[in-house]
Image: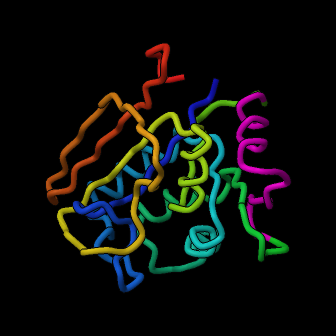
Amino acid sequence: MRNVTYSMGVSLDGYIVGPDGTFDWTDPDPEVFRFWIDDVRKIGTHLLGRRLYETMLYWETADQDPGLDDAMREWTSLWKPLPKVVFSTTLSTVQGNARLASGGLAEEIGRLRAAPGDGDIAIGGASLAADAAALDLIDEYQAMVYPVLVGGGIPFFPRHERRVDLELVETRPFDAGVVYLRYRVTRGDGTGR
């Protein structure tokens, strides 16, 4: 069965976006960007909320930018064909290899898990991840922790009145002071499922 993962850059105090609405502190250095390139290869489908979808639209045409470096061209070549499902109540169309969700989040994830295919089901966006967490659908939390305190904003971890036990399965420090943390959700049977 395919894992559902939630992976984003996060400040040390736990936010994916600061109180001013920016996340410029997550601009990756070449080593971190290489990690993200390798990581996207493990994804079979990416679920996005509207805001993250609109932020990532740049990559649908980025390969037309003559100033793009080799790493960004490689990222674009992986991102563009990646199947994406966009959850939005305001969009009527989407671009690229994306489709609007035809059902609820649990229904979409259930359908994707049952369908043949490889790669994780990645969730992007705090609101969508919060909904998935509330439904106990997330199998792994993957945080790229940046050495900055932003003091508020949109939290990485959903706020709900429920305990979630996690098992640390991977850490990786980067020269820029960034640390990648990968946690598997442990459930009653201890398997993570």
Please name whichever residue, 42 or 8, is drawn nearer the observer in this view of the structure. 8
Q: Image check: 104 left or right of 52?
A: right
Please name whichever residue, 125 or 188, is drawn nearer the observer in this view of the structure. 188
Residue 27 colored magenta? Answer: no
Q: Residue at (49%, 58%) from the top-left corner? A: 75
- Region rendered in magenta: 94-114
Image coordinates of residue 6 in percent, x first then y, are 49, 47
- Looking at the image, can residue 63 be seen? no
Image coordinates of residue 59 in percent, x first then y, are 57, 69
Q: Is residue 85 above or below residue 133?
A: below
Q: How many marks?
A: 0
Q: Residue at (62%, 29%) from the top-left corner? A: 2
Q: Image check: 163 left or right of 97?
A: left
Q: Looking at the rendering, which quadrant does residue 152 occupy?
A: bottom left
Image coordinates of residue 102 in percent, x first then y, are 85, 54
Please name whichever residue, 65 or 105, is drawn nearer the observer in this view of the structure. 105
Q: In this view, does 95 lie above or below 190?
A: below
- Looking at the image, can residue 151 be seen? yes
Q: In this view, does 78 lie above or below 109?
A: below
Q: In this view, does 130 lie above or below 165?
A: below
> Residue reaching furthest bottom?
20
Image quadrant where one finds the C terminus: top right
Residue 99 colored magenta? Answer: yes
Q: Image check: 176 left or right of 63?
A: left
Q: Looking at the rendering, which quadrant does residue 23 occupy?
A: bottom left
